Image (cartoon, rainbow, N blue to C red):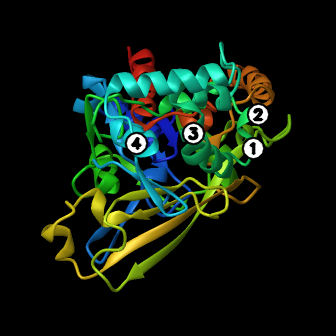
Amino acid sequence: MAAYDYLIVGAGLYGAVFAREATDAGKKVLVIDIRPNVAGNVYTEDVEGIHVHKYGAHIFHTNDRRVWNYITRSPVANFHGELYSLPFNMYTFNKMWGVVTPEEAAAKIEEQRREAGITEPKNLEEQAISLVGTDIYEKLIKGYTEKQWGRPCTELPAFIIKRLPVRLTFDNNYFNALYQGIPVGGYTKMVENMLEGIEVRLSCDYFANKDELDALADRVVYTGAIDAYFNYQLGPLEYRSVRFETELLDQPNFQGNAAVNYTDRETPWTRIIEHKWFEFGKDAEGNDLPKTVISREYSSEWKPGDEPYYPVNDAKNGALYEKYRELAAGETKVIFGGRLGEYKYYDMDAVIASALAKAVEELA
């Protein structure tokens, strides 16, 4: 008999949720991860009492009370020194156009949409102009998005921009979600709590010991890149990667905000994250810490050896993923899950919901 019911490859959100559900259902579980820590890309490490988001800023948000029970702050846009409120709301529209009522803002957006001749948006550029007009698209979306994805906005699918909320109100909450927040103690602590009482092996390379590890369990939950699982035999899928330049500064406050997005094309970084403001208010509580930690975030095309962050969900990659999915269907012992395993541009709450749904299906 196998020593475990489930081998879970990856100690990120998907793996941790599935592991917790399986364990609570009486299954014996082993979780492995190639990194020396749990929590995947939501890993936070302590630096001078500040929880630093090592793999990029994460604000948890969801409308799903079940997901919320299972287990903010708004960014600013900087365009050549001009600061605009994010998400796009009446503060943004007022500064851009001088409008003061929702009706005036809506009329301006509609006017610019008509001038652009857009009826049915066919790409990200047209979708963005339909949502917020040409002026805001040119200043606050185009440069940032092309830096992030490394492609012209006209070549990106329209659905990507639908994640960004637009409000005709003076509401600065970043997401249109019922529940938003950052876990006290950081995401690492949250994932450690999920994995409490579960055997975890870190710095464990699945592919270096695949046959031996697979033999330990009846079922495998794989949360890594699906093309890597099949040794890229159909060719590599495309991803965007991210790198960070992180500094510990001998000052209490660098920018007064958790995230400032740089929306012009010329600035090489997409945003600067000041990690302390995710958990501390912009007041004496945070300023009592004499230092601060900032990270400049740069987006790049993925290449072997880089961390794959975001699937590029365009038509070409979608067609290739479908071929990999056919191969995956033949792996009767293996469940493919998560952003990389399913090649989906998931938010955190969608990852958790997907893991919960798969656990229900598996453990019924």
The mark lying in front, picked from 3 and 1, is 3
Asked which secondary structure carries label 2, the reply is helix
* Amino acid on which the number 1 mark rests in the picture: Arg
**CA distance for labels 2 and 3:** 20 Å
Task: Identify the residue position indicated by label 4 in the image.
Answer: 92
**CA distance for labels 3 and 4:** 11 Å
> Could you say which quadrant of the image residue 235 lies in?
top right
Q: Where is residue 57 drawn, in percent x and y?
A: 43, 54
Residue reaching furthest to the right: 234
Q: Nearer the viewer, residue 110 or 9?
A: 110
Task: Identify the residue position indicated by label 3 in the image.
Answer: 135
Q: Where is residue 102 drawn, in percent x and y?
A: 34, 26
- Mark 2 residue crowding within 10 angstroms, few (<14) / some (14–19) / many (20+): few
Q: Nearer the viewer, residue 213 or 279?
A: 279
- Mark 3 residue crowding within 10 angstroms, few (<14) / some (14–19) / many (20+): some
Q: Is residue 47 above or below residue 166?
A: below
